[in-house]
Amino acid sequence: MIDRRYAPPGAAGGPGGAVMYWHVDDLAAALERLRSMGATEYQAYTERGMGFVTASVVDPFGNVLGIMHNPHWLETLSRQP
């Protein structure tokens, strides 16, 4: 994340764009870290079922960053050659 003062002229002031979800090992800790860096909560910690959880924040540029923890994805990844 970067300070809003480095945004290009005419950059949007609010959230926008597609939400990209990054897998993290500890969603609660990652969410707290993002908040400590200046992000604001966009979507709260949400349990989706079977250990799959998501949350998202808005960075100083208005981009939405999603984070997730998904045991099924980890299982699938571990089977890759």
Image: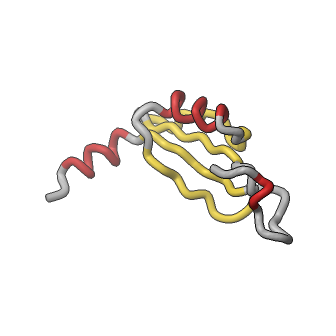
Q: Is residue 32 above or below residue 78?
A: above
The residue nearer to you, when weighing 68 against 34, is 34
Residue shown at 30%/44% (left/top)?
74
In the rendered image, the residue lying farthest to the left is: 81
Q: How is the image coloured?
A: secondary structure
Measuring from the top left, give residue 65's x and y in whole percent: 61, 51
The residue nearer to you, when weighing 39 against 44, is 39
The residue nearer to you, when weighing 51 against 78, is 78
Measuring from the top left, give residue 6's x and y in whole percent: 75, 59
Residue shown at 26%/44% (left/top)?
75
Please state if 29 lies on the left or on the right of 59 as rendered: left
Instruction: Report the number of discs.
Output: 0
Measuring from the top left, give residue 76's x and y in whole percent: 26, 50
Residue shown at 54%/41% (left/top)?
54
Please state if 55 lies on the left or on the right of 7 as rendered: left
Q: Is residue 17 above or below residue 58?
A: below
Please state if 55 lies on the left or on the right of 78 as rendered: right
In the rendered image, the residue lying farthest to the front is: 6
Q: Is residue 32 above or below residue 4?
A: above
Q: Give the quadrant of the C terminus.
A: bottom left
Measuring from the top left, give residue 77's x and y in whole percent: 26, 51
Residue shown at 84%/58% (left/top)?
13
